[in-house]
Image (tube, rainbow, N blue to C red):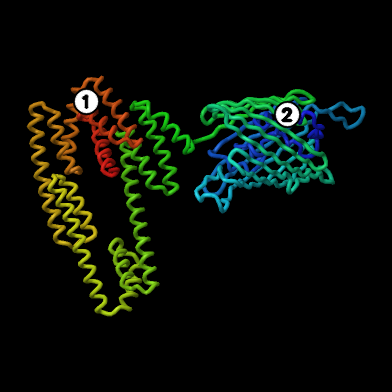
Amino acid sequence: MLIALASCTRAAAQAGAGAFLRQEPNARAAALAGTTASLSDDAGSVLVNPAALTRLLKPEVDATRVLLFEDTTFDVIAAGLPTRNWGSFAGAYVRQATGGFEARTGPNDPPSAFSVGQSAMLGGWGFSPRLPWEDADAPAASRQLALGVTAKSIRETVGAAAASSSGLDAGVLLHPRPDVSVGVVLDNLIAPSPAFVSSAIRYPRIFEISPSYVRALRGDWRLLAAARLRHVEGEGNEPAGAVELQYGRLAALRLGLQGKGPSTGVGIAFGNTRLDYALLLHDLGISHSVTLIQRFGQTREELEETIRRGISRLSRADGARLAKAYLQKADDEMRDDRTMEARRDIEAASLLDPENADIAARLKKADAAWEESLRRQTLERLASLAQQQQEQGNLLAARQYWRSVLDMDPSHALARRGLESIDRALSGAEIARVESLRQAEAANEVALALAGAATSLSRGLLRQARLEAERAQKRHPENAQIREFIEQTRRQIEAFTAARRAEAAKAAAARDFPAALAALQAARREDPDNQDIARQESAAQAELRRTLPDETRKQAEQLYYRAVDQYLKGRYDAAGALADEVLKLDPSSEPARALKVKVEAAQRYSR
């Protein structure tokens, strides 16, 4: 492709009106001979193809300096901001200046120096409409169509004279296949027409089409090829072609060829910082281009990669760092209203950084949000069923649904109106029959709930029995059987915890802190909100921890993070076995004990 382009007739030099805006806006574009209408992925897209702004994944700031020949410089400062629902926005300031000119008022007057300059302020917007056959949750960067516009205000100066105007560019980006992109740009759709003295100089309209193809090579290598055909009104066609060899996100080598001459360049990236360099061989000399791009934040994919790489390092410091990555991922999921996924990631963060009280508080908040989400969904479902049955004339069924809604939310106005409407339509006998059926159903529900709670009680699971009864009480707050069961369970919990505390005091007096801690932990499992037990447990843990050698603590810590790794991968049996090993080495490890509880719950659920 490059050899064929070399044999093409060279296009006219970019010396016409507005030629400075046809200068490549950054070093990557310069190295690739300007074939980036389908490749651009940075804020410089506002100059190349505004539709490509949809590829922005993070906020960024770009700065480019081009050293041309004959005392000429070209500078670009650009910034981009992607949004979740409104597309991506970018702005740029472009300035080209040339000095060293001389002027005389008359043939015998001494010369005076003057300069020529062009500048522009640009603002662009790109968005990706979802096509009918695309998934509703497809990210903007993966959609097959993107559109964009750029508004610009230009100013040109020659010595003391100046002229200004404004214009509009438009662009389209197509992805017919994941490895193929096509950019189409119409510059100066509304053409600037600056007037220095009397007549205006209109910028030429420019049509450009640029296809590109990406091929994955071995390992992290991939090869990108691109071409461009640009038609400048009144100047003719300007073909160009380029190739880029990339190694992951780290480095790239670039070669290009266009009418102005061959070009080459390199790029290197470290995290959110990218530095590009290009060299272009003009007929008039060599120009150098340098671009610095600074991005901010992490994408969801980067966070997940951080998590995958870091979990195997098995240290407390890395655990805290990974916990932050999980929390950032959870923040994104909460913004997308993906409460269940966010709760799972906050739970992972709490396991990786178990001593962080803020994470524990966030987990409680996520649990509350998840429960509220479930409650809201259940209410919406019941109300929908009630309305459906009422519209179909099934008033008795609709009445039962409305009553269920009111049981969950007594202030539900729609349910009250629906129930009142149905009661006016039903006879007294029908209402009595419905209420009789409802009471029988409630009695059966209470009996089942108490039977389950009694089973837990018989197994010695006092707190679980109480929680099951309290859940039933929320549905049936006036039921005397449930109240009596809860009171009976409360007395048993008090007796059990008192016995365990006495046992712990006796063991502590004998300096048997493992036995004391085991008794207090048993008491706290049944009464977790008892602050006196919590203080005694903390004291016993501190005494026991003082007796552990440093090597044992370090070994227990490593085993704990291995257990967390296995738990997050869904290997619950291995996670449980490792948690048991931790507790044998360090019976005071509260994180290991909490992990063991989660593992047992996951095992019950999976089976």
User: Which quarter of the picture shows residue 79?
Assistant: top right
Which quadrant, please, contains the N terminus? top right
User: Closer to the camera, 598 or 18?
Assistant: 598
Count of number-bearing discs: 2
Question: Label 1 belongs to which residue?
Answer: 585
Mark 2 in CB contact with mark 1 (< 8 angstroms): no
User: Closer to the camera, 192 or 482?
Assistant: 482
Residue 532: mark: none
Q: Is the residue marked by circle 1 packed among few (<14), some (14-19), or many (20+) residues within 10 Å? A: some
Name the kind of residue labelled 2 in the image. Leu
Place of residue 127 in the rendered image (x, y in percent of width and height, measured from the top left): 59, 47
Disc 2 from disc 1: Cα separation: 67 Å
Residue 2: mark: 2
Name the kind of residue labelled 1 in the image. Leu
Name the outermost residue toward the right: 107
Place of residue 382 in the rendered image (x, y in percent of width and height, measured from the top left): 35, 63
